[in-house]
Image (cartoon, rainbow, N blue to C red):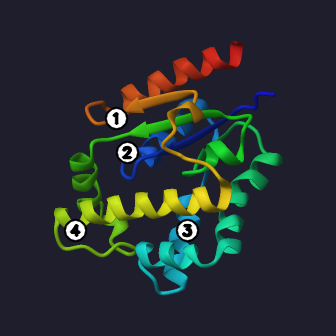
Amino acid sequence: MKKHIITIAGDHASGQGTLSNLLKERLGYEIYRNGQYVRKLANEMNMTIVEFQEYLNNHEELDREIENSAKNYAETHDNLIIDAKLGWYAVKESFKIYLKVDLDVASKRVFNDANRKDSEKFETIEEVKKQIMYRHSEENARWFKTYGVHRDDMSNYDLVIDTTNMKPEEVCSLVIEKYNKWLKD
């Protein structure tokens, strides 16, 4: 059964947050963000996002709590955008999107994003690149061990978009077009 829920997963700095905000404006949907919850927990524990991710490797119950939060929220809400790396897995009846981005472009986006400075520590773009690759690898290993899923398997998604050379508005328009078609099919 299809619900009026869009789940957005993607590479780090692929534009998940930006797309969520644009979809909220255009569709009037509410946004649920797992990433904000994770960053909040990391800050409360006085950890960088990488340190917190390593902590989650040994605390499966907390990882499950984080991932289940999106599922639990979706059970009582509709007209919803879920910005979560495993949102597609948690809410199977959603329209599932994966955003890809070139690693060099992602690294520059992260390096220049002032909002990430509280939970991510880096001095150079090269450090950012290493951090992104490390986080991606760690997340994939943890999620396969915990849930038995591979987020890099693009068959998990209804729509895959490479945002490297696209404007956010173009991505949003494409998502809405494909989402409306998905709802009708």
Q: Amino acid at mark 1?
A: Thr
Provide the secondary structure element on which disc 1 rests.
Answer: loop
Q: Of discs 1 and 4, which sits in the foreground?
A: 4
Q: Residue furthest bottom?
A: 46
How far is disc 2 from disc 1 in space, using C-alphas? 6 Å
How far is disc 4 from disc 2 in space, using C-alphas? 18 Å
How far is disc 1 from disc 3 in space, using C-alphas? 24 Å
Disc marking residue 163: 1
> Which picture quadrant has residue 126?
bottom left
Report the residue at 54% width, 42% height from top.
8
Provide the secondary structure element on which disc 2 rests.
Answer: loop
The residue identified by callout 4 is: 127
> Which picture quadrant has residue 117?
bottom left
The residue identified by callout 3 is: 38
Report the residue at 69% width, 35% height from top.
94
Relative vertical location of residue 5 with respect to residue 134 in this rendering, above or below:
above
How many residues crowd mark 1 within 10 Å: few (<14), some (14–19), many (20+)? many
Q: Of discs 4 and 2, which sits in the foreground?
A: 4
Provide the secondary structure element on which disc 4 rests.
Answer: helix
How many residues crowd mark 2 within 10 Å: few (<14), some (14–19), many (20+)? many
Report the residue at 74% width, 34% height from top.
93
Dot 1 or dot 4: first in sequence order is: 4
